[in-house]
């Protein structure tokens, strides 16, 4: 009889993450098995062989797949559990496809999503060849490819992939969202015969079959997908490439909570590709001499780009329209006359983010989230952008019955309506989360690229990965909109968004004119972004982080408590604060900073109240030591290394 430690993909009421089972058939580490768990059956993964225990064990029911999960994946799951202190059952559940026990019919279409057409690749520039040589020669496990927008990072990814395939190794390419990076995906599909694409729009059956294809393949595989693609069971993993590595979507905020960047670095050599690296990543890679700079455009061009800052407070510049400045309007008209495109960016969708009564001050809030509702004028309804609930637009105030209801602020829908008035003959396309799925940018990108649309309006969806060769006018409607958030990452995120959207026009295709409208034209972040000056931005923000004892100089643990009543929430938060201080004193931990209990950014919802405590430590081990001694009630939520404190 053989005995094995199994990690179930289902939570159970024990402190251990592993359970012992017996099997007459010898098993390998990584085998996926079906096991009895309580009164039901569950799926589990063999993690380790063990000796016969001194208690009675249950037999493994059956082996689901003859091919075991690769060793690197088992190690990654165990590391993730230990590093982020999350249940191993939730990690196993995330690593395995849904419906894994179901019998699937053979695929009737090519599961590899192949579009291979032997498309010729643009010759690599000297800068790109140098970057490839530096990446492959660098001994560091994680290398940051800091390439300006339009520098040809995709060509470098393709060349690195070719090298790995020649060595008989698989690669995983992570993208923030498949829909926002369809151009990069298509480039890979053109150059390689067999690309496995994994994403959330696929059916459960398709994802399962693709996962099984990767598991059972004997040849090197190319996997492309969002952060969950890291769990693709490929053999001989040689390289992980993370495109747009600064994106928040690489952080999972539900159990198991983890950073795909940190997990990837534990699995294989990892390339972080981005024009706007996270401050912490740049700092760490700089310490290890693992930064490769790419500061030349891939397309050599004599085209010029002008950038103009426009003060939103100067109302004389907004004489023709309250949202769009006269210089921007004139530039859009010039682009239309020359049969070129314009792009108008504003990172807020809807028509107006605030509906209030000017008489008594009543504000339209979501009944569930207690957050401001956003007006969507095209459907004439109020919508909560947190839970998605819709409400009718009131004609009179529910409190004072006065008819003085006003809608404040603006979003992409209102901007679209203003542009239609200014340019009635132009074909305008709006691209944001409210756009119908069949009209999203990735679905109509070929038409956009060919110039079928005159003016593009949208949120950050327009700022990522797409190349618009006909673009000559770019307008950022309110560049400082994100700077008002009370969070340490607000400035960093604003710089990234502005820089990325500027990069849509500054690619050497056309003589381009960029207009950045802002209430704070002298603000440092706006200035750094308009100049594409990452070096000064990095020094500026790093200095602020050091003074505030924030990453990369400290590690963070966010602890949140949620109860039905405010009294219970405050009382338990104070109790938790006292407990943490006692642990720090008892264990004589040094360089620990604990914020007093404070209301969370979204403090009050219908389900209750949430307060939070932030623990900062010079050593991450000290954070773990504190956390391990806390009472893990269902009211406590925790997040190691949070990318935001909101």
Image (cartoon, rainbow, N blue to C red):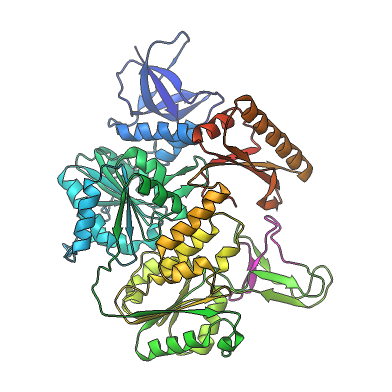
Residue at position x 40%, y 34% from top?
77
- Please identify the residue farthest to the top as the structure is shown: 54
The reply to whether the magenta stretch includes residue 368 is yes
In the drawing, does residue 354 fall left or right of residue 271? right
Q: Does the rendering let one see residue 204? A: no
Q: x%, y% of residue 542?
A: 48, 53
Determine whether 485 is above or below 204 in the image.
Answer: below
Residue 566, by quadrant, is top right
Span shown in magenta: 363-384
Determine whether 319 is above or below 491 in the image.
Answer: below
Determine whether 257 is above or below 483 in the image.
Answer: above
Q: x%, y% of residue 214?
A: 28, 42
The kind of secondary structure the magenta stretch mainly shows is loop
Depth check: 313 or 337 in front? 313
Q: x%, y% of residue 316?
A: 59, 89
Q: Does the rendering let one see residue 385? A: yes
Residue 152, by quadrant, is bottom left
Residue at position x 68%, y 35% from top?
576
* Image mark count: 0
Q: x%, y% of residue 277?
A: 40, 56
Depth check: 173 or 216 in front? 173
């Amino acid at each position: 009889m053989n005995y094995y430690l199994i990690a179930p993909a289902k939570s159970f009421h024990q402190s251990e993450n592993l359970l012992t089972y017996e099997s007459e058939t010898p098993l390998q580490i990584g085998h996926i098995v079906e096991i009895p768990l309580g009164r039901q059956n569950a799926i589990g993964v063999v993690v380790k062989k063990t000796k016969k225990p001194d208690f009675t064990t249950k037999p493994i029911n059956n082996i689901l797949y003859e091919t075991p999960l690769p060793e690197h994946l088992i190690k990654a799951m165990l590391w993730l559990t230990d590093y982020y202190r999350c249940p191993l059952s939730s990690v196993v559940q995330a690593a395995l496809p849904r419906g894994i026990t179901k019998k699937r019919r053979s695929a009737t279409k090519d599961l590899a999503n192949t579009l291979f057409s032997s498309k010729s690749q643009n010759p690599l520039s000297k800068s790109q060849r140098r970057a490839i040589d530096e990446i492959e020669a660098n001994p560091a496990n994680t290398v940051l490819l800091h390439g300006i927008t339009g520098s040809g990072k995709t060509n470098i990814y393709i060349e690195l992939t070719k090298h790995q395939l020649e060595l008989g190794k698989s690669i995983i390419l992570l993208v923030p969202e498949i829909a926002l990076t369809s151009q990069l995906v298509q480039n890979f599909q053109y150059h390689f015969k067999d690309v496995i694409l994994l994403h959330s729009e696929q059916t459960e059956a398709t994802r399962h079959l693709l996962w099984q294809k990767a598991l059972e393949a004997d040849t090197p595989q190319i996997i492309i997908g969002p952060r969950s693609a890291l769990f693709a069971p490929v053999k001989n993993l040689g390289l992980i490439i993370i495109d747009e590595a600064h994106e928040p979507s690489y952080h999972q905020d539900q159990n198991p909570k983890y950073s795909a960047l940190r997990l990837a670095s534990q699995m294989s050599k990892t390339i972080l590709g981005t024009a706007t690296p996270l401050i912490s990543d740049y700092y760490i890679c700089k310490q290890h001499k693992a930064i490769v700079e790419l500061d030349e455009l891939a397309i050599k061009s004599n085209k010029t780009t002008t950038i103009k800052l426009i003060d939103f407070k100067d109302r004389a510049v907004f004489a023709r329209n309250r949202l769009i400045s006269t210089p921007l309007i004139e530039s859009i008209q010039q682009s239309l006359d020359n049969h070129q495109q314009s792009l108008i960016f504003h990172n807020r969708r809807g028509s107006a983010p605030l509906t209030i009564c000017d008489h008594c001050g009543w504000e339209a809030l979501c009944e569930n989230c207690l957050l401001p509702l956003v007006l969507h004028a095209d459907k004439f309804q109020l919508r909560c952008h947190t839970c998605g609930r819709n409400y009718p637009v009131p004609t009179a105030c529910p409190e004072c019955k006065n008819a003085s209801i006003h809608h404040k602020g603006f979003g992409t829908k209102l901007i679209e309506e203003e542009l239609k008035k200014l340019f009635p003959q132009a074909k305008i396309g709006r691209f944001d989360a409210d756009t119908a799925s069949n009209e999203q940018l990735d679905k109509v990108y070929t038409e956009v690229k060919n110039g079928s649309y005159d003016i593009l309006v949208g949120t950050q969806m327009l700022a990522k990965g797409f190349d618009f060769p006909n673009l000559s006018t770019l307008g950022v409607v309110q560049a400082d909109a994100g700077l008002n958030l009370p969070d340490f990452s607000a400035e960093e995120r604003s710089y990234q968004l502005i820089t990325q959207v500027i990069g849509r026009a500054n690619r050497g295709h056309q003589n381009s004119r960029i207009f950045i409208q802002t209430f704070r034209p002298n603000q440092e972040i706006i200035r750094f972004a308009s100049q594409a000056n990452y070096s000064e931005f990095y020094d500026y923000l790093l200095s602020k982080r050091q003074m505030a004892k924030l990453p990369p100089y400290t590690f963070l643990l966010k602890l949140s408590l949620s109860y039905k009543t405010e009294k219970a929430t405050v009382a338990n938060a104070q109790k938790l604060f006292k407990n943490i201080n006692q642990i720090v004193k008892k264990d004589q931990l040094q360089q620990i900073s604990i914020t007093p209990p404070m209301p969370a950014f979204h403090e009050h919802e219908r389900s209750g109240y949430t307060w939070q405590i932030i623990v900062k430590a010079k050593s991450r081990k000290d954070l773990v030591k504190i956390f391990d001694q806390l009472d893990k009630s269902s009211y406590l939520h925790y997040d190691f290394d949070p990318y935001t404190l909101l």
